[in-house]
Amino acid sequence: MPAPKPSDEPGRMWKLTGPNSMHTAMHAHWTMPDIADELDLRVETVHGYRSRKQMPDPTGVIGRTPYWMDATIAPWIERQKARRKHVRVWATTTSSPLVAS
Protein backbone atom coordinates (compact mmCIF):
# COMPACT_ATOMS: atom_id res chain seq x y z
CA MET A 1 0.00 0.00 0.00
CA PRO A 2 1.34 3.44 -0.83
CA ALA A 3 1.92 5.83 2.01
CA PRO A 4 0.21 9.25 2.00
CA LYS A 5 2.26 11.87 0.16
CA PRO A 6 2.41 15.60 0.80
CA SER A 7 0.18 17.39 -1.69
CA ASP A 8 1.13 20.28 -3.97
CA GLU A 9 -2.45 21.56 -3.87
CA PRO A 10 -3.01 24.52 -1.52
CA GLY A 11 -5.23 23.62 1.41
CA ARG A 12 -4.65 19.87 1.14
CA MET A 13 -2.23 18.25 3.48
CA TRP A 14 -2.13 14.76 1.97
CA LYS A 15 -2.57 13.36 -1.49
CA LEU A 16 -3.97 9.89 -0.90
CA THR A 17 -3.43 7.36 -3.66
CA GLY A 18 -4.12 3.69 -4.12
CA PRO A 19 -7.12 1.43 -3.52
CA ASN A 20 -6.77 1.47 0.26
CA SER A 21 -5.57 5.03 0.60
CA MET A 22 -8.00 6.06 3.37
CA HIS A 23 -7.10 2.91 5.30
CA THR A 24 -3.41 3.80 4.92
CA ALA A 25 -3.99 7.36 6.08
CA MET A 26 -5.98 6.28 9.13
CA HIS A 27 -3.17 3.99 10.26
CA ALA A 28 -0.55 6.68 9.74
CA HIS A 29 -2.37 9.05 12.12
CA TRP A 30 -4.13 8.80 15.46
CA THR A 31 -7.17 10.98 16.13
CA MET A 32 -8.84 11.56 19.49
CA PRO A 33 -11.47 8.84 18.86
CA ASP A 34 -8.67 6.40 17.93
CA ILE A 35 -6.82 7.18 21.16
CA ALA A 36 -10.02 6.92 23.20
CA ASP A 37 -10.81 3.52 21.66
CA GLU A 38 -7.29 2.25 22.32
CA LEU A 39 -7.44 3.30 25.99
CA ASP A 40 -11.11 2.35 26.47
CA LEU A 41 -11.99 5.94 27.39
CA ARG A 42 -14.56 8.46 26.24
CA VAL A 43 -13.44 10.98 23.61
CA GLU A 44 -14.25 13.74 26.09
CA THR A 45 -11.66 12.33 28.50
CA VAL A 46 -8.95 12.44 25.82
CA HIS A 47 -10.03 15.98 24.95
CA GLY A 48 -9.59 16.89 28.62
CA TYR A 49 -6.07 15.40 28.64
CA ARG A 50 -5.21 17.53 25.61
CA SER A 51 -6.76 20.69 27.10
CA ARG A 52 -4.80 20.22 30.33
CA LYS A 53 -1.57 19.49 28.40
CA GLN A 54 -1.42 15.96 29.88
CA MET A 55 -0.60 14.38 26.52
CA PRO A 56 1.77 15.22 23.67
CA ASP A 57 0.87 18.12 21.42
CA PRO A 58 -0.70 16.98 18.14
CA THR A 59 1.56 16.52 15.15
CA GLY A 60 -0.86 18.64 13.13
CA VAL A 61 -4.46 19.57 12.50
CA ILE A 62 -6.58 18.76 9.47
CA GLY A 63 -9.54 21.13 9.49
CA ARG A 64 -10.46 21.14 13.17
CA THR A 65 -9.26 17.59 13.79
CA PRO A 66 -5.93 17.18 15.60
CA TYR A 67 -3.87 14.13 14.71
CA TRP A 68 -0.78 12.45 16.11
CA MET A 69 1.80 10.38 14.26
CA ASP A 70 2.36 6.91 15.71
CA ALA A 71 5.92 7.72 16.82
CA THR A 72 4.59 10.70 18.80
CA ILE A 73 1.60 9.17 20.58
CA ALA A 74 2.41 5.44 20.88
CA PRO A 75 4.84 5.82 23.84
CA TRP A 76 2.30 7.97 25.69
CA ILE A 77 -0.47 5.43 25.04
CA GLU A 78 1.71 2.61 26.38
CA ARG A 79 2.47 4.62 29.56
CA GLN A 80 -1.24 5.27 30.01
CA LYS A 81 -2.06 1.58 29.60
CA ALA A 82 0.59 0.62 32.16
CA ARG A 83 -0.62 3.29 34.59
CA ARG A 84 -4.29 2.29 34.19
CA LYS A 85 -3.42 -1.39 34.65
CA HIS A 86 -1.59 -0.55 37.90
CA VAL A 87 -4.55 1.50 39.16
CA ARG A 88 -7.04 -1.26 38.29
CA VAL A 89 -4.99 -3.90 40.09
CA TRP A 90 -4.69 -1.68 43.17
CA ALA A 91 -8.42 -0.90 43.16
CA THR A 92 -9.39 -4.58 43.01
CA THR A 93 -6.95 -5.68 45.73
CA THR A 94 -7.75 -3.08 48.38
CA SER A 95 -10.98 -2.61 50.27
CA SER A 96 -12.53 0.80 50.33
CA PRO A 97 -13.50 2.26 53.72
CA LEU A 98 -16.57 3.70 51.99
CA VAL A 99 -18.00 0.30 51.09
CA ALA A 100 -19.86 -1.49 53.88
CA SER A 101 -18.99 -5.17 54.23
Image (spheres, grey):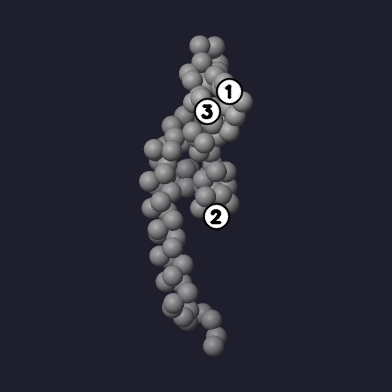
* Disc 2 residue type (three-letter): Asp
Q: Which of marks 1 and 2 is nearer the N terminus?
A: 1
Q: Position of residue 57 (x, y in %)?
A: 42, 37
**Which quadrant would the C terminus be assigned to in this image?**
bottom right
Asked if residue 11 is positioned above or below residue 31 in the image, the reply reads above
Q: In which quarter of the image is residue 20?
A: top right
* Disc 1 residue type (three-letter): Gly
Badge 3 marks a residue whose secondary structure is loop
- Rendered residue at 38%/46% (across/down): 75
Of all residues, the one furthest to the right in this rendering is 19
Evaluate if marks 1 and 2 touch, with contact meaning CB atoms under 8 Å apart: no
Evaluate if marks 1 and 3 touch, with contact meaning CB atoms under 8 Å apart: yes
> In whole angstroms, how far apart are the C-alphas of marks 2 and 3?
29 Å
Badge 1 marks a residue whose secondary structure is loop
Q: Which of marks 1 and 3 is nearer the N terminus?
A: 3
Is residue 19 visible from the viewing direction of this image? yes
Q: Which of 37 and 28 is in front in this view?
A: 28
Residue identified by numbered label 3: 1
Residue 40's tag is 2
- Rendered residue at 44%/35% (across/down): 69
Q: Position of residue 64 (x, y in %)?
A: 57, 30
Q: Where is residue 92 in the image (x, y as percent from the top left)?
A: 47, 74
- Rendered residue at 56%/49% (across/down): 37
Q: Callout 3 environment at 10 Å: few (<14), some (14 to 19), or many (20+)? A: few
Q: Which of 2 and 91 is in front in this view?
A: 2
Q: Which of 84 and 100 is in front in this view?
A: 84
* Disc 3 residue type (three-letter): Met
Residue identified by numbered label 1: 18
Mark 1 or mark 2, whichever is nearer to me: 1
> In whole angstroms, how far apart are the C-alphas of marks 1 and 3?
7 Å
- Rendered residue at 40%/58% (across/down): 82
Is residue 54 visible from the viewing direction of this image? no
